[in-house]
Amino acid sequence: MITDGEGRVVFFSKTYGIFLGINPEEAVGKKCYEVVENSRMHLVAETGVPEINQPHRIMGQDMVVQRIPIVIEGQGVFVSAK
């Protein structure tokens, strides 16, 4: 999943959609926390501070995630999560 600087989803992978039971096309344009429970990607976009190897509980499963702010040619902040 990739969000813009406002925390809106601009890309949502098919694989992640299958895992969450979400149609990726329907996720695009929504706020990240409306699509993924406990999402903090909007906070990373606000602060610009990456979150590496952080615990994240999704659908009752504990995971370790990375939330990484990206600036492309000064065009604002995008956040990518793995």
Image (cartoon, rainbow, N blue to C red):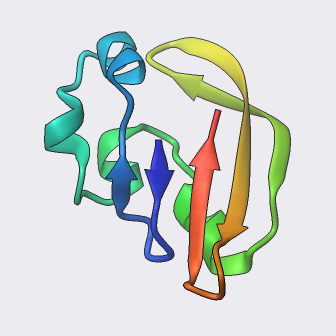
Left or right: 48 in relation to 32: right
Q: Quadrant of the C terminus?
A: top right
Image vertical order of residue 71 relative to residue 41, above or below: below
64 or 38, nearer to the observer: 64
Residue at the image position 61 percent from the left and 71 percent from the top: 45
Residue at the image position 38 percent from the left and 12 percent from the top: 19
Left or right: 47 in relation to 27: right
Image vertical order of residue 61 relative to residue 66, above or below: above
Q: Residue furthest right?
A: 53
The spot of residue 37 in percent (x, y) is 43, 38
Q: Quadrant of residue 71?
A: bottom right
Left or right: 11 in relation to 63: left
Residue at the image position 57 percent from the left and 83 percent from the top: 76
Image vertical order of residue 54 relative to residue 69, above or below: above
42 or 12, nearer to the observer: 12
Left or right: 63 in relation to 41: right
Q: Quadrant of residue 63?
A: top right
Q: How many marks?
A: 0
61 or 22, nearer to the observer: 22
The spot of residue 8 in percent (x, y) is 36, 64
The spot of residue 38 in percent (x, y) is 51, 42
Q: Quadrant of residue 41?
A: bottom right
The spot of residue 5 in percent (x, y) is 51, 75
Q: Residue furthest front?
A: 73
Residue at the image position 64 percent from the left and 74 percent from the top: 72
